[in-house]
Image (cartoon, grey):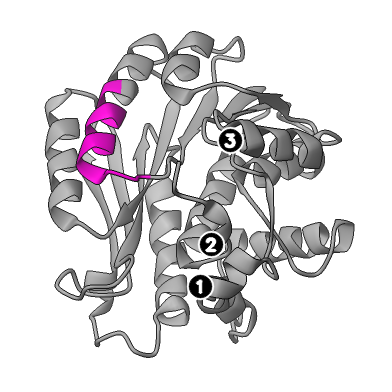
Amino acid sequence: MNYKHAYHAGNFADVAKHILLLQLLSQFSAKAKPFYVLDAYGGRGLYSLQSTEASKTGEADKGIGALENANLGTPPKAIAQYLLDLATARKTYDKYVYPGSPWWIANHALHHSTDAPLRAEAFESQADEYDALNYQLYQLPIGIHHRNAFEGVPAVLPPKEKRGIILLDPPFEQEHKDFSRLVDLLVASHKKFATGTFVLWYPIKNKEAVELFYKKMKRTGIKKQLICELNLYPNDVAVGMNGTGLFVINPPWQFDEHAKDILTTLAPILKPADAPRMSLDDMVVVKWLVGE
């Protein structure tokens, strides 16, 4: 596998993704019933923003660095919680750490999910990444498994808790091929857990591939499909990644409104100085691909 998240840890896509993930976790925890969370692409769990990879790209400076240096005033609760949780990670490990999704989930289980018990698991198929994930998070309340998402996700569904979030955060090395396989995975998983909340992160760099994914998902007949996009560059500008998206099936009530507030707050903060001017409506897209 050529893709390594260490180059991109803490970038604008990570910031948006993890804050929206915390919003979902918070809404699930608001109901006093147990729930299950699976991160199907766990990665290493923890990343150093001083690593050779992170230093080479400098992406974190324009992501988490920009957010930490911003004058936020009174931000949406999920953004404030994200910054507090990040401070916890840095106090626990070191000041240059940036946590991956499994850590945010496990930390929520440890500190923010007392009334609604959370059972958390993470899969990682790459041996070296799995070893790092298992070593770095072994003291936290999350099960770590050396497992492939395409085999593992349908196998563990439905969970015994009957409520759950399934997070898919793949590397997207070949967009058209990856999107097609992910449609199949979402359909197969939804058949086994129709009431589950499925969350797919995706990069926006090839708009044709993204639009084709939307068309395929619309044809599946699955209800309640929500699109959440943060676009920092217009589609016709050739950059590594123009934007970031989160596709959510069965989001909790009012998650769309919270997502709009979060992304609207983040957009002017994370927009690079060299990016062409864009309207807020073009930068932030939160809409239902399929309703009820």
Q: Which mark is residue 28?
A: 3
Q: Earlier in the sequence, mark 1 or mark 2?
A: 2
The residue located at (60%, 45%) in the rendering is 101
- Counting from the top left corner in percent of width and height, residue 241 is at 33, 65
Image quadrant in which you'd find residue 103 = top right
Choose between 78 and 104: the one closer to the eye.
Answer: 104
Q: Secondary structure at mark 2?
A: helix
Q: Earlier in the sequence, mark 3 or mark 1?
A: 3
Residue interval drawn in magenta:
172-184
Q: Main secondary structure of the magenta part?
A: helix
Q: Taking 176 as reference, is 78 above or below it?
A: below
Image quadrant in which you'd find residue 253 = top left
Q: Secondary structure at mark 1?
A: helix
Choose between 71 and 170: the one closer to the eye.
Answer: 170
Image quadrant in which you'd find residue 126 = top right
Per the image, the residue denoted by label 1 is: 57
Q: Quadrant of the C terminus?
A: top left
In the rendered structure, the answer to whether residue 112 lies left or right of residue 120 reads: right
State yes or no: discs 1 and 2 in contact (Cβ < 8 Å).
yes
Between the residue at mark 3 and the residue at mark 2, the CA separation in whole angstroms equals 31 Å
Q: Which mark is residue 7?
A: 2
Between the residue at mark 3 and the residue at mark 1, the CA separation in whole angstroms equals 35 Å
Q: Earlier in the sequence, mark 3 or mark 2?
A: 2
The residue located at (47%, 80%) in the rendering is 269
